[in-house]
Image (spheres, rainbow, N blue to C red):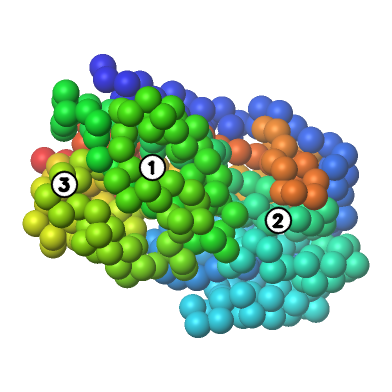
Amino acid sequence: MKKTAIVALAGIAAVTVALSGCGRTEPGAEGGDDAAGFAADASIGVALPDRTSENWVLAGDLFENGLEEAGFEGDVQYAGSSNAVGDQQQQIQQMIDSGVEVIVIGAADTNQLATQLEAADAAGITVIAYDRLIQNSDLVDYYVAFDNFHVGELQAQSLLEGLEEKFPGEEPWNVELFSGSSDDSNSAVFFDGAMSILQPAIDDGTINVVSGQTTVQQTATEDWAAENAQNRMDTIITSSYQGVELHGVLSPNDNLARAIIASATGAGFPVPVVTGQDSEVASVESIVAGEQYSTIYKDTRALVAAAIDMVSELQAGEEVTTTGESDNGAVEVPANLLEPVIVTQENAAEAYAENPDLEPLTQP
């Protein structure tokens, strides 16, 4: 069994452990006791950033159905694409004014919610940061997400394994690096995790970043927009890859991975080794077809379930499930971090065996 399959099995097992409640925090030990013991049919706000990703759309549907099944009244809203930050700020304020007991926030901008957090705190509302850790505030009560530093580590390990598999003995491998949007706090975490693996390979000459662009600022992709990634890749190819082979690209998610592949193949290159994240349908199909090399599976169903479990525990006045703490620059936020799973062509069928949306894509 190759390393990728072993990592996948370990990751699946870890998700099960994380959801089973290992490690718990007393309500109010570090915050989050404001809503303990509230009414079983209380209103719960869920503020999500956009509909540009399959996972955000799925999360909204899961929150609506899951909160209803748990007996709560859910208020699930998406920010608009043209003014996502302003829309989300207004939506959160409306939730506060309407008397919700808890607000679950997938932030459009993790640094632009100070006023809303102060209003929520004044109203005695518990704030749960969902998927993206809200930064530089001591008014974030809980955080639920996948372990995003480990996501970056897995992407980098996958990139190196793919390069060895596809281009054995051709070191130094020519590689380019991409990171996500600068207004998303996860972007730097993904990138830092990846660079903890890749920097030693850059330092010893195993990897050559031909463009020389190796910082999170240089590699950022604003708004997580595919066209921005494709334009940057086009520019890099024109300026740095005339007569030079492109072996691989670190991509932080699937949407950008497909744009990067389109740029490379449009310029006449064979498909390089490209990583991803989110297990989007088009990328799973691409991986099974032997094009995109890998993705990260972060089961949105498990993450939403973990968030709703937090709400239920708060409602009942119980201890809130956590696995540790995450530093947001102002405070260590009690956090429940689930384990991500790396997926390649080799282990796709196994990784998605219990996902009704993705499992059929891996079948012959």
Location of residue 105 (image quadrant): bottom right
Residue at mark 1? 296
Residue type at mark 2: give it: Gln
With 356 as the anchor, is 148 left or right in this view? right
**Quadrant that contains the C terminus:** top left
Instruction: Select label 2 or label 3 by which is in front.
Output: 3
Measured as percent of width and height from the top left, residue 77 is found at: 58, 73
* Whole-number angstrom distance, CA of label 1 to CA of label 3: 29 Å
| 52 over 278 or under it: above or below | below
Instruction: Select label 1 or label 2 by which is in front.
Output: 2
Query: Residue lying farthest right?
Result: 122
Label 3 residue SS:
loop
With 272 as the anchor, is 36 left or right in this view? right
Q: In the image, what residue occupies the spot 65% across and 61% down?
A: 110
Measured as percent of width and height from the top left, residue 213 is found at: 40, 50
**Quadrant that contains the N terminus:** top left
Residue at mark 2? 135
* Whole-number angstrom distance, CA of label 2 to CA of label 3: 41 Å
Residue at mark 3? 244
Measured as percent of width and height from the top left, residue 132 is found at: 60, 54
